[in-house]
Amino acid sequence: MTFSVTILGSSSALPTSKRFPSAHVLNVHERLFLIDCGEGTQIQLRKFKLPMNRINHIFLTHSHGDHVLGIFGLISTYNLLGRKTDLHVYGPADFEEILFKNIEYFTDQISFKVIYHVVDPFRVEQIYSDKHVVVSTLPLRHRVPAVGYLFREAPKPMNIRKELIAKYNLSLSEIVNIKNGSDYVTPMGEVIPNSQFTYIANLPRSYAYCSDTLYSERLVGLLKNIDLLYHESTFLHADLRLAKLTGHSTAQQAATVALKANVGKLILGHFSSRYTDEDKFLKEAQAIFPQTEIVYDGQKFTVEQKSAC
Amino acid sequence: MTFSVTILGSSSALPTSKRFPSAHVLNVHERLFLIDCGEGTQIQLRKFKLPMNRINHIFLTHSHGDHVLGIFGLISTYNLLGRKTDLHVYGPADFEEILFKNIEYFTDQISFKVIYHVVDPFRVEQIYSDKHVVVSTLPLRHRVPAVGYLFREAPKPMNIRKELIAKYNLSLSEIVNIKNGSDYVTPMGEVIPNSQFTYIANLPRSYAYCSDTLYSERLVGLLKNIDLLYHESTFLHADLRLAKLTGHSTAQQAATVALKANVGKLILGHFSSRYTDEDKFLKEAQAIFPQTEIVYDGQKFTVEQKSAC
């Protein structure tokens, strides 16, 4: 079952010749979730052969142009393609009005519903779930209200040890009861605890997207032990003053969050266009958290299944 | 002196993995004029190394998203870069309100003036001139009001034949008078007509951008003898019915316009994404007008100076 992230755009506010503005696509079991939607997102979706019709949910972190300006064109394109499926957009309260003004202007007789969900940038809350994934907000600290998003695979039903089905000659209803957490009582009245029958096959995988934000100790607590963390890294630590002034993080700070939260892997992006040598971000971060990579547009990060046994 | 066009985007409404939405840049003597501004224009400007700070004039043909959605990001970027110079935008009346709504939303304390010039989509009029270029509108026939633009080098002052300056021992004021069109009267009272003294060194070069439009006989008259014509070619002629239905042209129609107008070269773009083999556009057009090319993003067309002698 797939759990992977493709980077569509990784520039900071000013795109470069190599980096489009912010956008990621998370593939969870072949459903695509779009996170941020910078200018050119629809172009990148086509370039990297991601089927845009599988996107039914877009999560916007904040209302700065480099994170949202691709959504008008994407929605316009969906309309030209005759989309029928509802499109759910999650984002800050103030973006709703301008979004719908643009939709009204740029689409004739829209063929599908755009449903806007206002997210509270100050609270941690679960805002979406289906049978495969649960999405929660991660309050960020930026110049304007901003949220990150944490995607975690939904807990799966417990697996039952097959050899015990045979040993105890379990009926279908007994198997269902055990999977749902009941202990088993033998015909002789012996109680065998549920834990002897069941196990979790795979641990839920997780990915968090944190951009744009100052260094945040609160974030550390919310990201504990996640598998893959994208954290913005607009500046090098030598420019910490600028980072603070503009509401951004340095590579060192991103790595510190990753280290303290004990994440599996850190990926960095949103580099200021002032820097020509992006390897400096990597070196700065790896000195603190070795499991760091810097992203490039089109790159795909797969989180492999991890057995719980 | 430069007179060249670079293609930034050449898709029709749906961008493809190879073609961005519509945008061209005309370079006249190192001043850049942007024509249309589809999504991703600022990214293409960087990619093709065109200095965006040399653009002071943007000409929009109509208000469909694939021709204008890049302007919000471009203006936002200019603001981040601290632009001071006025930016003149020419376009349809109905686009003004949504443009300024988006500018207001996406730019904090804008550092430069955006001056919007409403163009009349039904009249042929000169809307801009400087010492190098004159820009006129070309009424198009689309589903919404639309104009193309004709760029023509400004007429240069006449050159004076140097050998005659010596022969008649002309003074500076006599030279100026002759350059301004006066005949010369010798000290003996002989009148020598101006045409014997003067000549045009180079013919003014011209480029026209016509997208989106149905076939237009009126356009033929307005494009007579221009050097370089970009004409949309959304459909092949086998799909003429679709072209008519959607307010577009076929390759055959674009070539017919070029042939009847006796242009120097025809370049085609705005191909519908339904076609996989774009060579068919070229073949269809070249059967009527051999001096045709189909454009690709990043391609540059230079119009060479033509001696009038």
Image (cartoon, coloured by chain):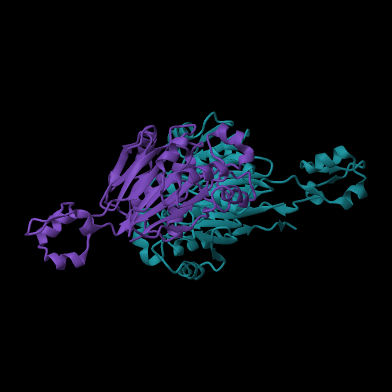
Chain colours: A cyan, B purple
Residue A300 is left or right of residue A123, and the answer is: right
Q: Nearer the viewer, residue B228 or B68?
A: B228
Q: Would you place residue B144 above or below residue B36 in this image? A: above
- Residue B233, image x and y in percent? 54, 44
- Residue B231, image x and y in percent? 49, 45
- Residue at 55% over, 57% down: A229
Residue B225 is left or right of residue B274, and the answer is: left
- Residue at 15% over, 67% down: B167
Work out whether residue A216 can be spotted: no
Work out whether residue B88 can be spotted: yes
Q: Would you place residue B146 above or below residue B75 in this image? A: above
Q: Among all residues in the image, which is located at the extreme top?
A: A109
- Residue B116, image x and y in percent? 31, 39
Q: Would you place residue B90 above or below residue B263 in this image? A: above
- Residue at 22% over, 63% down: B161
Q: Nearer the viewer, residue A162 or A142?
A: A142
**Quarter of the figure with the C terminus of chain B:** bottom left
Residue B53 is left or right of residue B293, and the answer is: left
Q: Nearer the viewer, residue B199 or B150?
A: B199
**Quarter location, residue A295:** bottom right
Q: Nearer the viewer, residue B73 or B270?
A: B270
**Quarter of the figure with the N terminus of chain B:** bottom left
**In the rendered picture of this protein, how many numbered marks are placed on residues?**
0
- Residue B200, image x and y in percent? 28, 57
**Quarter location, residue A171:** top right
Q: Would you place residue A184 above or below residue B204 in this image? A: above
- Residue at 55% over, 65% down: A292
